[in-house]
DNA sequence: GACGTTGTTGCAACACGTTGCAGCAAGACC
DNA sequence: GGTCTTGCTGCAACGTGTTGCAACAACGTC
């Protein structure tokens, strides 16, 4: 039961660097381009662990380069998501939340009262996925799942 | 497996009218006020079955009275939700979706590819709620749950 | 019916994200 | 290094929803 924000230990930093280094080639393979704007966002992402909102990422890019344009960042995030490099879900208010370099697919749990958030564990996730798979043949996108309610402490 | 938009048969229209008629008193009991703006939104809601986005409701109010102010509508929706008269969730893009007069609590399922939506059945809902209740004592707000993925037909 | 309290409204500004489009530039090819 | 193709960017406008605040009005009380 890892609280979000204290990110789980993940692969080593050198593995991470390798993963980020390949982004350029992954884009090129698809006939897409490696631009300064994309380079900047990837640089920001590579220093981000865990979860960030879209607006946070725009902000962090703007810190590096104040001429950053929001729509370019959001469009680049869409591209990176197609490549599987980031995934997004939505907070309780519907705002975007990005998972960077998702080690394992997972959903999120938010307490409406105290605002705390947790990752949905593999077992919990499997149970939800299995329920909808069995009954309807529906393939759940677990990383887009956000469940809101009240945590044990707040009840 | 009711597709959303072909609303399930619900209580009779006269029951509905009675429920809507009590809104005024339910507000007053709490020291809240029954204003023309609230009257207008309740009139719109009383003719709405199933699911609507917040923006839809603003639009429908504006059809009745072009001087309608969006923030007033959204604030009134918040109040009505506190009274349990409407509930909201979020579509795949994070936009608000209101359930009007929810007969039974239910979540939603959206196919990312074809855009179709279904209600999560009582059994499916119970399974999800039970999983998180058992493991963590987390009380899921089922009516706020939206699960996105791919439906059987689109797989 | 006038009065006071306080919940509500209208408004303007803001936050987050998306979209259409014209001009720009990445990178493939020579 | 020059040329071409086409993916990308910047920009402006828009869509959806929230917030702060001053003026207003619902409604309980006399
Ligand atoms: Mn919500
Ligand atoms: Mn989404
Ligand atoms: Zn809590
Ligand atoms: Zn589908």
Image (tube, coloured by chain):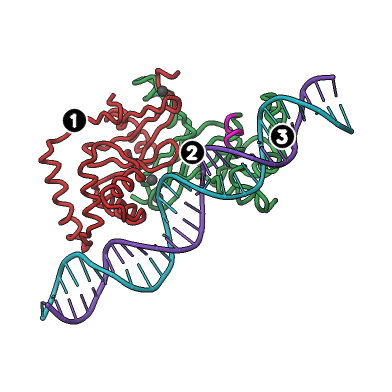
Chain colours: A red, B green, C cyan, D purple
CB contact under 8 Å: marks 2 and 3: no
Q: Residues within 10 Å of mark 3 (few under 14, many from 20)?
A: some
> Who is closer to the viewer here, C25 or B127?
C25
Q: Closer to us: mark 1 or mark 2?
A: 1
Instruction: Assess whether residue B80 is covered by the magenta stretch.
Output: yes
User: Is tag 2's residue or tag 3's residue first in the polypeptide sequence?
Assistant: 3
Q: Specify the segment rendered in magenta.
A: B78-82
Look at 22% across and 60% down and name the residue there. A35
**Circle 2: element type:** strand
Q: Give how far across and how far down residue D15 sits, in percent.
A: 51, 54
> Spatial distance from mark 1 to mark 2, Cα to Cα?
33 Å
> Spatial distance from mark 2 to mark 3, Cα to Cα?
26 Å
Instruction: Assess whether residue A138 is covered by the magenta stretch.
Output: no
> Who is closer to the viewer here, A3 or A123?
A3
Q: Give how far across and how far down residue D4 sits, in percent.
A: 22, 80
> Spatial distance from mark 3 to mark 1, Cα to Cα?
54 Å
Look at 21% across and 63% down and name the residue there. A31
Q: Which mark is residue A9?
A: 1
Q: Give how far across and how far down residue B10 sits, in percent.
A: 62, 37
Where does label 2 land, which residue? B89
Q: Closer to us: mark 2 or mark 3?
A: 3
Where does label 3 land, which residue? B34
Q: Residues within 10 Å of mark 2 (few under 14, many from 20)?
A: many
């Amino acid at each position: 039961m890892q609280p979000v924000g204290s990110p789980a230990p993940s692969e080593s930093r050198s593995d991470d660097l390798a993963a980020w280094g390949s982004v350029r080639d992954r884009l090129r393979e698809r006939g897409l381009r490696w631009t300064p704007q994309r380079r900047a966002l990837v640089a920001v992402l590579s220093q981000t662990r865990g979860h960030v909102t879209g607006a946070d990422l725009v902000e962090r890019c703007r810190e590096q380069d104040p001429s950053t344009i929001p729509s370019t960042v959001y469009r680049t995030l869409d591209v990176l998501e197609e490549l599987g490099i980031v995934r997004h879900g939505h907070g309780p208010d519907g705002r975007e939340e990005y998972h960077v370099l998702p080690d394992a697919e997972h959903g999120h749990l938010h307490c409406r009262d105290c605002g705390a958030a947790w990752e949905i564990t593999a077992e919990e996730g499997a149970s939800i996925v299995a329920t909808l798979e069995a009954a309807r043949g529906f393939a759940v996108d677990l990383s887009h799942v956000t469940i809101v309610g009240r945590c044990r402490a707040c009840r």
